[in-house]
Image: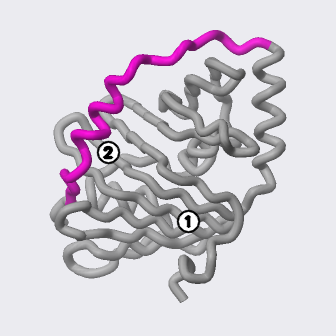
């Protein structure tokens, strides 16, 4: 199956990656206590909507576009749209499996969302872990190493072979949330720039009926 790429906003996100690296210091008891409190506050959040831009690369090819990601418990709806052509794909599903729409040859179905993206698009995106990382949390089920920056917020997280670099945080939220999340596991890179993050159920006009 032919790979699908969205070149429109890649340059902007690559420039963002050149921003100064924030301060990183090893975890201490105070920082870990702050992180544990954040994780407790956000652990009960089952519904959220994220909008921004996503860029991915395998070291040779890449793609990018505007992203809208809705999460409702174990169910998700992940839509990426090219800014110029308007071409898009949509990944949705839950525990029962995933559906990838908007690709050549019609919808693709399977039990594993990450495998669908890998097969259809050639993208390596750790969706299960990324669900926690975009909230600034450690994913469950495996050890993680943390380093911290200002205000005892994570600056770097290493987990499951990926290095997650937090370049900016939205501290206007009641519980601070990431604004720039760059994950890498050479040669793969995933860069997420978040424009808005709404915790709680999406309004009905965002629910697709």
- The range drawn in magenta is 4-28
Q: In this view, does 106 lie above or below 7?
A: below
List the residue tagged with mark 1: 70
Q: What element carries label 1?
A: strand
Residue 115: percent from left, percent from top = 40, 58
Magenta portion: prevailing SS class: loop
Residue 41 lies in magenta, yes or no?
no
Q: Which mark is residue 56?
A: 2
Q: Which mark is residue 170?
A: none
Q: Residue at x 61, y 82 (%)?
A: 204
Q: Nearer the viewer, residue 160 or 81?
A: 81
Q: Distance between the residues labelled 1 and 2?
A: 19 Å
Q: What element carries label 2?
A: strand
Q: Nearer the viewer, residue 150 or 60?
A: 150
Residue lying furthest bottom in this view? 209
Q: Do the residues labelled 1 and 2 touch (CB within 8 Å)?
A: no
């Amino acid at each position: 199956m032919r790979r699908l790429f969205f070149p429109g906003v890649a340059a902007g996100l690559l420039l963002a990656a050149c921003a100064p690296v924030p301060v990183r210091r090893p975890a201490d008891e105070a920082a870990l206590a702050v992180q544990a409190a954040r994780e407790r506050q956000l652990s009960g959040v089952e519904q959220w909507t994220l909008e921004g831009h996503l860029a991915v690369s395998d070291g040779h090819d890449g793609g990018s576009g505007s992203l809208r990601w809705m999460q409702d418990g174990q169910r998700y709806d992940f839509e990426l749209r090219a800014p110029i052509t308007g071409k898009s794909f949509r990944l949705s599903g839950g525990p029962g499996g995933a559906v990838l729409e908007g690709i050549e040859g019609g919808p693709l179905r399977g039990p594993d969302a990450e495998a669908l993206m890998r097969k259809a698009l050639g993208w390596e995106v750790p969706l299960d872990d990324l669900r926690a990382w975009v909230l600034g949390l450690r994913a469950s089920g495996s050890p993680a190493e943390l380093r911290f920056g200002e205000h005892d917020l994570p600056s770097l997280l290493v987990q499951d072979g990926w290095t997650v670099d937090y370049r900016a945080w939205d501290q206007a939220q009641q519980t601070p949330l990431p604004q720039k999340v760059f994950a890498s596991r050479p040669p793969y890179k995933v860069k997420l720039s978040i424009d808005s993050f709404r915790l709680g159920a999406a309004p009905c006009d965002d629910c697709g009926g």
